[in-house]
Image (spheres, helix red, strand yellow):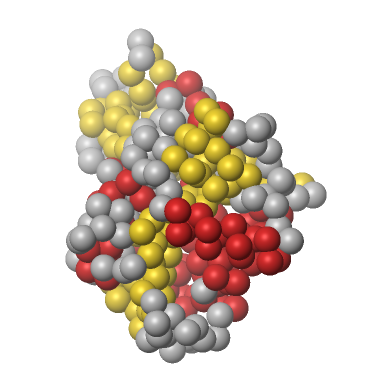
Amino acid sequence: MDKLLVDLINAFGVSGNEDGVKNIIKEELKETNFKILEDSLGNLIVNMGTGKKKIMVCSHMDSIGFIASFIEDNGLIKVEKIGNFQSKDIVHSIVKFKNGTIGKMVINKDELFIDIGITEKEEVLKFVEEGDTACLVGPCISKEHSIIGANLDNRVGCYVLLKLLKELSHSENEIYFVFSTQQQLGGRGARAAAYKINPEYCIVLDLEDVKDIIDGDGIKLGNGPLIKVMDKSLIMHEEIKEILDESAKALGINLQYGVSNSTSDGGLIHKEGQGIKTGEMSIPCKYKNSFSAMVNSEDIDQCIKILKEIL
């Protein structure tokens, strides 16, 4: 597995606290000549080219997580969710606070708690305070073409953008690569970036849990990137779909298609300004938003090839 992807997966990047991921991206780009802007919401915007069309390609840096809301007398740390996910998918997971404190996720009467192994409130407060955030942690496992780990959403998308920036020496278009913040809090970063850039086209990169697909002929990992024709917040613009279709066909890459019951940054981006032609290409994922999410490396490589062909 590429060390860059492992580093991105292991970085702390709960929504609203993306600096760990952002620092890795900055380090990867420090030897380049790209124009890099960090806006007031913490988005990293990388500009390449000054050509015919203005294109935005976007991936969010943040992951789901937890915020400490109360320390119980027995030492348990009551937490609230950051992001939209089901409690059953994270029960008994190992979590890590930003300062490195490790604990175990437990559920008691539908409330979420983190147990760091200390049974007195005063002692817990030496390590964790109300307002501290935590993320899922777990080993990164690579077996054949499968990649398993926590926080794949959407460090995989950030990895794709970085690989594109390294492989593209120039473009005939004006391209903006956006590493956005706070997707789990309503897509705040991507929306602000789209307003600032005002592109003609936008392609959103994300992970899509195969269980969220409600219209598709058996979406499978390793069978190609997923074109999300429609979700709860966006119908893919026909020009974006045509561009992706033609690029994949020219490269001999199979695409999968589906309708999802999820939402995405594209749902906000396409409404900015006078309207932005927007669509999403996703990497199919199993067990999304768990410590053992799973994707296929061939889907990732094919996504990179398609976008490189377009850009």
Whether 267 is drawn above or below 95: the answer is below
From the top left corner, tell me how far across and down residue 114 is, in percent. 39, 29
Left or right side of 100 for 42: left
Whether 125 is drawn above or below 120: the answer is below
Residue furthest out toward the bottom: 33
Q: Picture quarter containing residue 117?
A: top left
Q: Residue at x 77, y 47 (%)?
A: 143
Q: Residue at x 59, y 78 (%)?
A: 167
* Residue 14 visible, this orientation: no
Left or right side of 149 for 186: left
From the top left corner, tell me how far across and down residue 84 is, in percent. 36, 33
Q: Which image quarter holds the N terminus?
A: bottom right
Of residues 284 and 247, the one nearer the viewer is 247
* Residue 109 visible, this orientation: yes
Q: Residue at x 20, y 61 (%)?
A: 273
Of residues 310 and 145, the one nearer the viewer is 310
Whether 49 is drawn above or below 107: the answer is below
Residue furthest out toward the right: 144
Q: Residue at x 28, y 62 (%)?
A: 194
From the top left corner, tell me how far across and down residue 220 is, in percent. 68, 38
